[in-house]
Image (tube, helix red, strand yellow):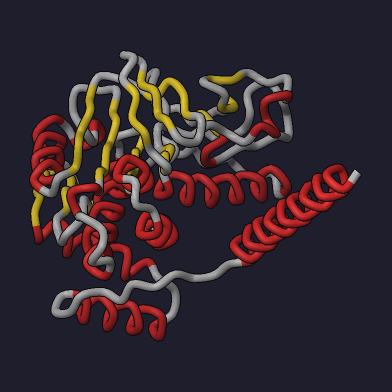
Amino acid sequence: MVALLEEANLHSDAAERRRLLTFVTAGGGFAGAETTGAINDFVREAVRYYPDLNPELIRVVVIHPGKFLLPELGEELGNYAERKLRERKVDVIKGVRVASYDGSLVTLTDGTSIPAATLVWTAGVKPSPVIATLPCQKEHGRLVVSEYLAVTGVPGLWAAGDCAAVPVLNTEKFHPPTAQHGLREGLVVAKNIAAVVLDRPLKSFTFTTLGQLASIGRRTGVAMVFGVKFSGFFAWCFWRTVYLMKLPRLQKKLRVMVGWTLDLFFSRDIEQMITLRDVEALSDLAGRIRARAKQSALDTSTQTAITRL
């Protein structure tokens, strides 16, 4: 995003600047809402370091096919999240999907087009293509397993996490492929494999979602914990506390906690990390520039020789 701000600052054409500063997120679930809020906060805070850029050129869009955002949390919290995002100048487009993207233009299923240099895809995930060729029973691309996480019809094969369709006991539903489910499924699989080796009884997988949390930017969150729904600053603090507790080692927890505390009182530092991919991209760009300059010099010398003749 810093690179896009830098590039937009070099252009004088308003339309090109607007395209570079348009960020579209496909999907309004947890990942989509959190990503949209984070992008909007960062870009609108960073643009003040670019006096030549008008903040009105920035456009952040979230596209969701449903009737309300965050369907996992229900309509009430979904509408609250939408209202807060709109207050922060985020465009929320509902009832349509992204049909195509060519790198500069996002086309929606209703025919609407949005010029944008960035498209973030959060509209669902699919299992690893490795399992696509397996001759096993599948549900939406995931391997159907028993309550013991053994793949149906294939003795000795087990599955857990995103690649497994894990049934909820005594229902026709499946557990969602979330982290809190996947971690516990992995433990059950390990114990059941050991039980098979040791000829012991297998353990069925049973788990009830503890809660779901989402940050929608600028110290605002939404949450549902043990069926209780709440939102606002307290939900955001609770979201941060939960993830802080999940970090390994006390040293890491203290570092993050100090950083988050300072963030409450001071603006964040804007910086860009140069990765190996960035170096490779710059090398490719330099190579194209050298090739273009060499070709231009060759064309000039050829034209000069023709003129002399």
Q: Nearer the viewer, residue 103 or 86?
A: 103
Q: Can residue 262 be seen in this view?
A: yes
Q: Is residue 208 visible?
A: no
User: In the rendering, at what x and y percent does residue 173 appear?
Assistant: 38, 22
Identified at 44% across, 60% down, the residue is 3
Q: Which quadrant is home to the N terminus?
A: bottom left
Residue furthest to the top in view is: 110
Identified at 21% across, 81% down, the residue is 262
Q: How many labels does the image show?
A: 0
The answer to whether residue 186 is above or below residue 237 is above
Identified at 66% across, 32% down, the residue is 129
User: Left or right: where does residue 269 sit relative to residue 167?
Assistant: left
Q: Which quadrant is home to the C terminus?
A: top right
User: In the rendering, at what x and y percent does residue 58 appear?
Assistant: 25, 48
The answer to whether residue 34 is above or below residue 141 is below
Q: Nearer the viewer, residue 305 or 144?
A: 305
Q: Nearer the viewer, residue 179 or 94?
A: 94
The answer to whether residue 121 is above or below residue 211 is above
The answer to whether residue 152 is above or below residue 46 is above
Q: Quadrant of residue 24?
A: top left
User: In the rendering, at what x and y percent does residue 158 appear?
Assistant: 65, 37
Identified at 32% across, 40% down, the residue is 15
